[in-house]
Image (cartoon, rainbow, N blue to C red):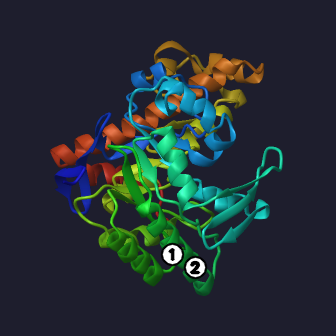
Amino acid sequence: MSCFEVIKSCGRARRGVLHTRRGDIQTPIFMPVGTRGSVKAVSPAELDTLGAQIILGNTYHLFLRPGLETINLAGGLHKFISYDKPILTDSGGFQVFSLANLRKITPDGVKFASHIDGSRFFLGPVESMLIQRTLDSDIVMAFDECTPYPATWEQALKSLEITARWERMSREQPLNEGQLRFGIVQGSTFDDLRKRSAKTIVDIGFDGYAVGGVSVGESEAEMMQAVDAAVPELPENAPRYLMGVGTPRQIVESVARGVDMFDCVLPTRLGRHGGAYVGNGQTISLKAAKFAHDFTPIEEGCQCYACRNFTKAYIRHLLNVGEILGMRLLTLHNLHYYLNLAARIRSSLENGTFNSLREEYLAMSQIL
């Protein structure tokens, strides 16, 4: 029985429901990133208020700190961080990409030097699945290699073959009852490799499928090309997840191409640097002098906590004097923006107005 069902479609866009052991997730959905067991500057209670349905954690970082012993003694990641909704854990494969100077790839995984203290350890599909089983996350990602950008066709093929081997090994490892396991499509910017990878991962057989190796330096057009190549090869009755994406427009455009799930650090990162999302994906810097006497909310009509209670002038003051509240308020606003965008997309798919919403975001740029 599939864990996913499509309720309504508009072209390739889907309104669906992903069933997990900790509740149903309405899709399309944006997932806030909580790499080390915390969405930066936001509490679990605030995530509930914002309408978050699921968050992310990272296998590599949680394995290093606080470590499996601590999380196991706590009764799993959910109890450790006091979060009772679904959690998806990244496998650590992205660190194979991001820590290139600290690693050595072998057929069965990667030898790492910790970015914290230089201590040596090994992470592969067997270890990643064991860690994620201990974390007891609800969605487990197969271990893959994120192909660097730019890459030659030959380099992308070699990376794809490593990923296929590791994902077969990931599929063979035991998990806890009810844990879902997602496979990951690679292939860089090459359509034939994306299609080959997608078919291989589908043949292995997973509960859901992700498109990885994007948002690693390629252009937005190349990103969408990768989605266009991979998604049609994925099953209609399984959830599709675009990893690490993206801007509001990229999310809307990917939904139009049949993607159901997204995560990205942009809303929290931008908030910590004094920025806010408004309108159809524009950003403003609250540090700007022009807001010194602006006693209006970040965005008129926004129902987030920051906009209902505070002004641009006050938030600018907090930022300029180094008060952490300023960063927290902007983070809350940006997460509200992203989660509200996902809710608007779902509603538009239900009532047949998705194409109009898409046009609003496309109108901001002609680069796609």
Task: Give the residue number, with chain letter if any, for mark 1.
Answer: 187
In this view, 365 is above or below 118: below
Residue lying at 31% horizontally and 48% vertically, measured from the top left: 357
Secondary structure type for disc 1: loop
For the question of whether residue 41 can be seen, the reply is yes
Q: Quadrant of residue 311?
A: top right
Pick the front one: 2 or 25: 2
In which quadrant is the C terminus drawn?
Answer: bottom left
Query: Which residue is drawn at the image coordinates 81% and 49% (left, top)?
Result: 119
Please state which amino acid type lies under the numbered disc 1: Gly
Q: In front here: 213 or 354?
A: 213
* Residue closer to the observer: 130 or 361: 130
Read off the residue under disc 2: 156
Residue 292 in sight: no
> How many other residues sit within 10 Å of disc 2, few (<14), some (14-19) or many (≥20)?
many
How many residues crowd around disc 1 within 10 Å: few (fewer than 14), some, or many (20 or more)?
many
Seen in the image, is 121 located left or right of residue 60?
right
